[in-house]
Image: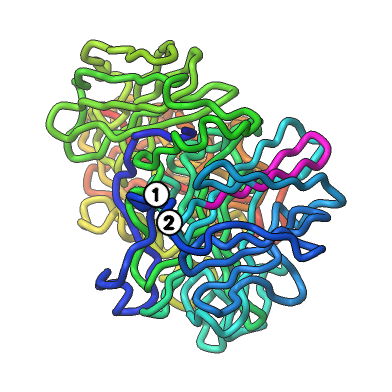
Amino acid sequence: MSGSDSHPVRRRAFVLSAAAAAGTAALAGPLASPASAAGFGWSDDGSNYVVDTGASLVFKVSKTNGDLTSLVYRGTEYQGYDGKNSHIESGLGTSTVTIAQSGSTILISVTYGTLKHYYAARSGENNVYLWTNKADTSVSATRYIVRVKKGLFLNDEPDSYTYTSSTIEASDVFAKPDGQTRSKHYAKVRVLDYDHIGWSTGSVGLWIVRSNHEKASGGPFYRSLLRHQSADGGGLYEILYYGENQTEAQRFGLQGPYVIAFTDGGAPSSSLYPGTLTTSWADSLGISGYVSASGRGRVAGVGISGRNTAYPYTVGLANSAAQYWGSARASDGYFSIGGALPGTYTLTVYKGELAVYSTQVTVSAGGTTTLNTIAIPSSNDPGNASAIWRIGDWNGTPGGFKNADLMTYAHPSDVRAASWTGNVVIGSGTETSAFPCYLWKDVNSGIIVHFRLTAAQAAAAHTLRIGVTTAYANGRPQIVVNDTWTSAVPSPPTQPSTRSLTVGSYRGNNYTFTYSVPASAWLTDTSAYNQLKIYVASGSGTTSFLSAGTSIDAIDLLA
């Protein structure tokens, strides 16, 4: 098995029809008696290995390069668009491709240099199980893409560009005539938010059920493209490593299984989900890098104290070889993360997406490492600090700020976005919702926060904090108070160097900027409003929404 029993916080089926959403159609999953399926087996047509699952699915794999060249479900061909097959990255070159049957399982093995890729079929199932073992950087293998013929699944969701060809950024962000934006990047969800992605007509569903992502990078809150659809056809992705807005180094080794699943229109069976899928049937297949359930371990925590119960808490395990995560129980913080490879990990507790505690933990094969109650020091949560005023919540996200929700599935130029400019008044009751979630040097730098201080507050120096979640082109905040005191330009923290704010992702490296504002900067008239101007400093970036920018977590003036 290559899985974890750490369940996502919430499950979301990307179902695009009412019938599919109702979930009344048949599911696709492992069968109780797979060997009973009639017609199960494989053949060689000269160019491809042809596998009949004995259910309603027949698929072909090229003997030359390991491409998936055909996916026929109930007599209809679903694979392929624009003359392209389904495959790793953009396809491999000449490879060694072999096939073997072991009882009720057929395994196709593909070797291309140091890369090994596998397709498995189980008798009586409408599923294709896939594993990919990337050993090093000699082979580009950041994704598997299932290419789907045009016209079979139609949608106008955020992660499509079916009805528009007007490019507004690079070659992958588009504007519709009505001003709404579309891009394959706009999937809305983080890794922990979904088990599967795909489409349904109401009578046929085609899905990729994701793997546990133990060899991926970025952790539970990472966002990347999951699917797309255009006039030419559609694509479903399992991202093995995606360099955009990436916060971690690439991990190597076997990733999977991830599953291509057909259904009668409903969601795939939960028995295929990461955390519930068991693959003891694959233990003896000889898959390179495969580690069975017996060779894995578990970490369990009695509880977590010092939590702010208004927020969800997630516990993550990570080292250079693997990553896992699980949700902390709302009542007491209990957590359990299973299916982990043996090794020493950094255990991190997240309040929302903000790391508030870390320690080291060791996982052993076949064992459970039990931790006593983890106590989060009060000082580890910036939200516990006493503040004169605060905009937003310290939770590692721009949630609650203006346009924050929209920005996970739209471009900042989208017609649905509220104005990115506009100043804020402390005490108005709309401090957070009126403050833009993102600041750019060329768009809304210099935004003003108005606030009053009492005589005692104005007589003292104070610390101002600005928390950010990521930045583009080294954008970072510089402040001016009452046009009389200007902070130094802070050094840029380490952040991803690629696009982020315009492709649906605010997730980078959370960082807090602190500014020591002297008492001489404040107005002594308690009836007058002080003015805090926040500028974006950077010599990088280009113009407009690709100028230097940053995403805001929280802003406060400490007492």
N-term-proximal mark, 1 vs 2: 2
Residue 112 in the image: state x and y as whole percent.
81, 42
Residue 88 in the image: state x and y as whole percent.
70, 52
The residue under the point 43% across, 26% down is 293
The residue under the point 57% across, 41% down is 102
User: Can residue 197 be spotted in the picture?
Assistant: no
- Residue 301 higher or lower than 256, as above or below: above
Residue 13 in the image: state x and y as whole percent.
36, 62
- As for residue 112 lying within the magenta part, the answer is yes
Q: Which residues are magenta?
A: 108-121
Q: Amino acid at mark 1?
A: Leu
Q: Amino acid at mark 2?
A: His
Write down the quadrant of residue 59 in the picture. bottom right
The residue under the point 55% across, 79% down is 75
Dot 1 corresponds to which residue? 272
Dot 2 corresponds to which residue? 196
Write down the quadrant of residue 306 in the picture. top left
Q: Tags 1 and 2 in contact by the CB under 8 Å rule?
A: yes
Please tell me whether the stretch drawn in magenta is mainly helix, strand or loop. Answer: strand
Disc 2 on helix, strand or loop? strand
Disc 1 on helix, strand or loop? helix
- Residue 216 higher or lower than 31, as above or below: above
Mark 1 closeness class: few <14, some 14–19, many ≥20 residues within 10 Å: many
Mark 2 closeness class: few <14, some 14–19, many ≥20 residues within 10 Å: many
Mark 1 vs mark 2, foreground winner is 1
